[in-house]
Image (cartoon, grey):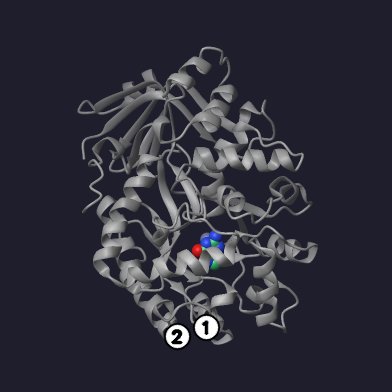
Amino acid sequence: MTPLLLRGRLLSFHRAPASLTDTGSYLYEEDGGLLVEDGRISAVGAYAEVKAGAPETVEELDHRPHLILPGLIDTHVHFPQMQVIASYAANLLEWLNTYTFPEECRFVESAHAARIATHFYDEFLRHGTTTVAAYCSVHKASADAFFAEATRRNMLMIGGKVMMDRNAPQGLLDTPQMGYDETRAIIEEWHGKGRNHVAITPRFAITSTPEQMSAAQALAQEYPDLHIQTHLSENHEEIRYTCELFPEASDYTDIYARYGLLGRKTLLGHAIHLSERETDVLSQTGSVAVHCPTSNLFLGSGLFPLKALERREKPVRIGVATDIGGGSSYSMLKTLDEAYKIQQLLGERLNPLDSFYRMTRGNAEALSLVDRIGTLEPGTDADFVVLDAAATPAMRLRMETVKTLPEELFLLQTMGDDRAVTETYVAGRPMKSNLLAPTLGA
Ligand code: GUN
Ligand code: ZN
């Protein structure tokens, strides 16, 4: 691969910003250079310096005056739910039973899964997202399609076939043994191939019998380095029913604790309505609560106490995510815009530096992948997003009065969407500009 030198305004976080004036928390290079060799970042800094050290054969791409950030990261999405978005339901359980479970049944067909996989990656790339942690359907074919397409595009993806053996239509059920065997087969086939990471994925306690939870526990013990992803305390009716199904557990979180499923690689979708005891368990085990703001508002699930969870003496680790298709946007900009509004309703502040930290480095830390993605550090993978805060007439007009970087970021978050994404790079290759026009019949 020819070495590539990108020029633009670089932004990358060293740590979570403590305040809007915490300039030490990030690197900002007004005329920056980013050298990419063999899919990795080999140098970063002032353009003139990086250029001086670059090989003679280097190809240059000038993105000025746009911002170049690490590729955006989404820590909770559902691959088989692209055609579930915008389904009209009163609440989570009605939405699952009426629309989501029937739709996921279609992923038994490899051809359908392969077609949706193409659209799935196209859409995330269009929105500047280069890594997602995804739930596939119960069918092995869906995980195969998910990872085959990720491999083809050389994208760093986390995914797993959901394990579910009760409380869903027949076409969506495995058994404890099948869930175990197929997850193992997917791990053996895909984990570590290309940039793929397989996650152990018991969907949630309602759809797994105690026997299947034990099978998930066995997988977690056999593969202790893998991510585990599931849902926790999203909706009051869900919590009540879950606790009824596991009467021996002291609460919802205790169910996962009893099956050894909590830890630093565990991603718990939603986690909105937690008791003090449950919050303590999450912080003690280092498990990650994944905030899905557009979904929580769309399904009326509740207001996630993000700032309160982080203010604790021992904070809870937090990721942010779209939760497609309970979520209503593929955009991490829109996702943080809604996260901001939820904190406003709770009387808390979420500042724009903090938001952009979360879409990038924060989510990489939540996934324990910050050594690979989420920053512009040399040695890490060359996944980037190029953002234009004047992408639409209304944004351009508002930009006339913007004076500072935080103001520009806040404008991007509040008014931006896929139109603000000028380019998306995966392992050093421009992807968004090379997407084919969507072929919906295909
Ligand atoms: N809980 C269990 N499955 C799901 C799902 O697909 N979406 C959401 N939002 N919550 C869930
Ligand atoms: Zn989910």
Judging depth in this view, the residue of 139 and 384 nearest the camera is 139
Q: Is residue 118 left or right of residue 236?
A: left
**Label 2, residues with CA under 10 Å away: few <14, some 14-19, many ≥20:** some
Number of numbered discs visible in the structure rendering: 2
Q: Measured along the vertical axis of the image, is residue 344 above or below residue 188?
A: above
Q: Is residue 316 left or right of residue 411?
A: right
Callout 2 amino acid: Thr
Residue 239 in sight from this viewpoint:
yes
| Inter-mark Cα distance, 1 to 2 | 7 Å
Judging depth in this view, the residue of 264 and 378 nearest the camera is 264
Callout 1 amino acid: Gln
Residue lying at 49% horizontally and 70% vertically, measured from the top left: 201
The location of residue 28, given as percent across then percent down, is 51, 25
Q: Measured along the vertical axis of the image, is residue 31 above or below residue 380?
A: above
Do residues under tags 1 and 2 come within 8 Å of each other at their CB atoms? yes
Residue 225 in sight from this viewpoint:
no
The location of residue 89, given as percent across then percent down, is 55, 59
Q: Measured along the vertical axis of the image, is residue 380 above or below residue 107?
A: above
Q: Secondary structure at mark 1?
A: helix
Residue lying at 58% horizontally and 37% vertically, measured from the top left: 337
Please tell me the numbered disc located at residue 175.
2
**Label 1, residues with CA under 10 Å away: few <14, some 14-19, many ≥20:** many
Residue lying at 52% horizontally and 83% vertically, measured from the top left: 212
Please tell me the numbered disc located at residue 212.
1
Residue lying at 51% horizontally and 83% vertically, measured from the top left: 215
The location of residue 88, given as percent across then percent down, is 52, 56
The location of residue 239, given as percent across then percent down, is 68, 69
Where, quadrant-wise, is the N terminus in this rendering? top left
Q: Secondary structure at mark 2?
A: loop
Which of the two labelled residues, at mark 1 and mark 2, occupies the earlier sequence position? 2
Judging depth in this view, the residue of 422 and 71 nearest the camera is 422
Please tell me the numbered disc located at residue 294.
none
